[in-house]
Image: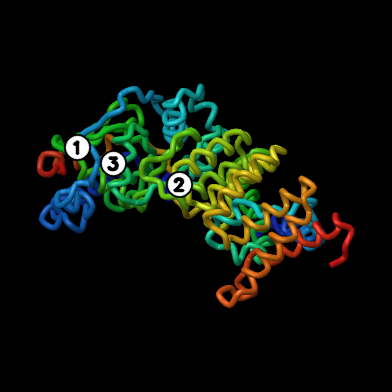
């Protein structure tokens, strides 16, 4: 773990500890994501974890060449579940990029004429 | 994987690498030929289509109007996403999407980001069930589908996004906007082979007034909730309203729509939506809680308190133990607020 990440993690924890338990909104409507998420029971428990996952993913994005603002914006567009799956896995998950269909055209042709459906 | 390949390319001479690629190609071809006998394991879903074609889906269909953006460099992610977004008339090109889905160091785009980026444009990103029938259902309904393929051979992994726009089962072909090819025809077998290794990953990104043909209520509403995080509020309102019309007895759809009305300050509409939902789900604690909040905001605290008592009774019933009731805290909070507004302490 990089020092920068540790620092950010500490900041996040500090902020989370201060703000999260004392969150008092005027309205106490139950949110739609709370109702539609399958893991509702664990929602409160994983609140801090979500913040950490997001912080980690932002720093991983930065390590992969995004500037800080871009990295934050992009992580913000993900759901808690998506960030949870991605955090720490960013170099292991597929990244679609190449379009060199020609490489396998030969193989395609062999199969193409034998079997199509 | 890709980075490793790059380093390897730099170290060995071009001729060696070409020879290596040739060997891999032949090995891959042999593997495929060997597989022809036992195709069932190589392309199980294509084999299953022979037995049973998905009910209610045409045998051939193509949406020729889907635009085409030839990909540049490694940017098939932005190109594929632009294809589905522009298919519904959004004025967006691959260049606009590079900053939200392309990862320079990976020379590609992550699946999660493909889903997330479309939400910013007010589209509901919906990941399809990993099955041919879901894919075919969407394409037959005219919805272009982004798919993740591994077009490498043998040990070579080469992830690629393309957009399926049509298919012709009697001819045994699927039609894709792919790379630099406007209309790539791939046999079902070949397509499945390349699609399988990514876990049959496929997504659509549709405007909020259109629900994917293969969508189920829970999955779709989760997708709308995900969009609500980042999209314009009207898009989410429209999506919930559409979902509620499609699945009128779904409590989440009603709650979602009511929450949108509430956020917009349309309390009367929120109340009406919640009352209709409550009529179908008299024991739904979130509906009771949220309706109580709305009524309290309307100054009808007595009615609100009655609803909260009802919610507390449901939570206290033997069927729901306090440990598993995820809404108990919210109900207590609402109750405290209502009592405070009534000038009472309990």
Labelled pair 1, 3 in contact (Cβ < 8 Å): no
The mark found on residue B136 in the picture is 3
- Which one is in front, A86 or B275? B275
Q: Within 10 angstroms of label 3, few (less than 14), some, or many (20 or more) residues?
A: many
Which residue is farthest right? B343
- Chain of the residue under label 3: B
The mark found on residue A72 in the picture is none
Above or below residue B241? Residue B330 is below
**Horizontal arrangement in the rendering, residue B153 relative to residue A29 (left or right):** left
Judged from the image, the secondary structure of the residue bearing numbered disc 2 is loop
**Horizontal arrangement in the rendering, residue B217 relative to residue A7 (left or right):** left
**Residue B123 in view (yes/no):** yes
- Residue, disc 2: B247
Q: Which quadrant of the view contains residue B320?
A: bottom right
Image position, residue A75 (x, y; %): 61, 46
Distance from disc 2 to disc 3, alpha carbons, whole Å, reads 23 Å
- Which one is in front, A84 or B56? B56
Above or below residue B171? Residue B34 is below
Judged from the image, the secondary structure of the residue bearing numbered disc 3 is helix
- Chain of the residue under label 2: B
- Residue, disc 1: B59
Q: Within 10 angstroms of label 2, few (less than 14), some, or many (20 or more) residues?
A: some
Q: Which quadrant of the view contains residue B313?
A: bottom right
Q: What residue do we see at 77% from left, 56% from top?
A: B302
Labelled pair 2, 1 in contact (Cβ < 8 Å): no
């Amino acid at each position: 773990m990089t020092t920068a990440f540790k620092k950010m993690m500490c900041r996040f924890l500090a902020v989370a500890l201060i703000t999260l338990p004392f969150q008092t909104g005027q309205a106490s409507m139950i949110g739609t994501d709370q109702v539609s998420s399958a893991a509702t029971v664990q929602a409160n428990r994983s609140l801090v974890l979500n913040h950490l996952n997001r912080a980690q993913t932002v720093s991983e994005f930065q390590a992969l060449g995004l500037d800080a603002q871009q990295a934050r914006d992009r992580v913000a567009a993900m759901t808690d579940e998506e960030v949870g799956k991605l955090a720490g896995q960013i170099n292991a998950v597929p990244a679609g990029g190449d379009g060199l269909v020609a490489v396998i055209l030969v193989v395609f042709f062999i199969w193409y004429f034998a079997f199509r459906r | 994987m890709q980075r490793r390949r790059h380093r390897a390319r730099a170290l060995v001479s071009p001729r060696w690498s070409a020879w290596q690629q040739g060997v891999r190609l032949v090995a891959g071809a042999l593997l495929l030929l060997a597989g022809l006998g036992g195709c069932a394991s190589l392309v199980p879903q294509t084999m299953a289509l022979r037995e049973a074609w998905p009910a209610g889906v045409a045998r051939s269909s193509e949406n020729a109007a889907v635009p085409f953006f030839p990909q540049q460099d490694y940017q098939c992610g932005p190109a594929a996403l632009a294809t589905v977004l522009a298919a519904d008339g959004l004025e967006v090109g691959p260049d606009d999407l590079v900053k939200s889905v392309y990862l320079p160091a990976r020379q590609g785009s992550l699946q999660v980001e493909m889903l997330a980026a479309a939400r910013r444009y007010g589209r509901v990103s919906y990941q399809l069930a990993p099955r041919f029938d879901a894919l075919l259902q969407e394409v037959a309904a005219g919805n272009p589908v982004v798919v993740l393929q591994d077009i490498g051979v043998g040990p070579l992994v080469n992830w690629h996004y393309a957009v399926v726009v049509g298919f012709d089962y009697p001819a045994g072909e699927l039609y894709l906007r792919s790379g630099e090819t406007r209309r790539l025809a791939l046999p079902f077998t070949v397509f499945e082979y390349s699609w399988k290794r990514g876990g049959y990953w496929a997504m659509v990104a549709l405007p909020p007034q259109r629900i994917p043909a293969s969508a189920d209520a829970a999955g779709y509403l989760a997708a709308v909730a995900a969009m609500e995080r980042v999209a314009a509020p009207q898009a989410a309102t429209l999506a919930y309203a559409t979902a509620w019309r499609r699945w009128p007895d779904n409590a989440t759809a009603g709650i979602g729509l009511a929450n949108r009305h509430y956020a917009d300050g349309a309390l009367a509409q929120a109340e009406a939506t919640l009352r209709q939902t409550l009529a179908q789900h008299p024991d739904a604690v979130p509906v009771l809680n949220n309706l109580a909040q709305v009524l309290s905001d309307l100054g009808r605290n007595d009615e609100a308190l009655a609803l909260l008592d009802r919610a507390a009774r449901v939570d206290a019933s033997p069927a729901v133990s306090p440990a598993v009731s995820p809404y108990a805290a919210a109900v207590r909070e609402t109750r405290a607020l209502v009592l405070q507004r009534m000038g009472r302490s309990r």
